[in-house]
Image: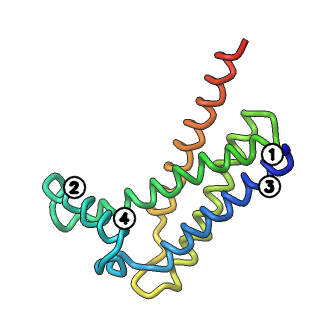
Amino acid sequence: MSQRAHLILSWVIVALWAGVIFFMSAHTGSDFDGTGPLTAIKRWLVGLVAPIFGPDTDIVNVAAHFTEYLIFGVLLVVAARRTWPALGKLALVAVALASLYAVTDEFHQSFVPGRMCDPADWLTDTLGATLGVAAAVFAIRKGRTKRP
């Protein structure tokens, strides 16, 4: 596969993941109380955290936001790495892009019945993206040191 094809594929994957985030934001947690894989994951997470944090704690929401954006941060670094070679600037751009998308995500949620625009969710999203970006940059730098 050519470098150009890798570049395009990397950004397509970023766009697809942004679509996953959009899809999840268009639903409430109760939308996943029926059957299917998302319901099974939700039940497992609730069963895992309820004994620790109590049955009324919505740790699943926090974990979902954090994880979605952690993955988004990694994907942005992978795609951006093919576009901009400067790793330091790339990391800042990736975090800024993820945080900006999180703002639009929260705005989108304000139009979804049962959802709301929550600055705490934006902060959780941005922290998740920051960790994802940091992990990806660390992996890239570590990979550089192993090569002769």
Task: Say whether residue 106 is left or right of residue 44.
Answer: right
Residue 82 placement: quadrant: top right
Task: Say whether residue 116 is left or right of residue 23.
Answer: left
- What's the residue at 22%, 55% (across, down)? 49
Residue 120 placement: quadrant: bottom left
Instruction: Report the residue that reaches farthest toward the front.
Output: 1
Eye-nearest disc, 1 or 2: 1
Within 10 Å of the Cα at label 3, are there few (<14), some (14-19), or many (20+) other Cα atoms?
some
User: Can you give x and y, in whole percent of width and height, for residue 129 in the image?
Assistant: 55, 49
Dot 3: what SS?
helix
Residue beneath label 1, please? 1
Residue beneath label 4, please? 61
Dot 2: what SS?
helix
Residue beneath label 2, please? 49
Report the quarter where the N terminus lies.
top right
Q: Which of marks 3 and 4 is nearer the N terminus?
A: 3
Label 1 – label 2 distance at C-alpha: 44 Å
Residue beneath label 3, please? 8
Q: Earlier in the sequence, mark 2 or mark 3?
A: 3
Eye-nearest disc, 3 or 4: 3
Dot 4: what SS?
helix
Label 2 – label 3 distance at C-alpha: 39 Å
Residue 122 vertical placement versus 39 (above, below): above
The three-letter code of the residue at mark 4 reads Asn
Residue 71 vertical placement versus 64 (above, below): above
Q: Earlier in the sequence, mark 1 or mark 3?
A: 1
User: Can you give x and y, in whole percent of width and height, for residue 71 in the image?
Assistant: 54, 51
Q: Which of 24 and 54 is in front in this view?
A: 24
The three-letter code of the residue at mark 1 reads Met
Q: Earlier in the sequence, mark 1 or mark 2?
A: 1
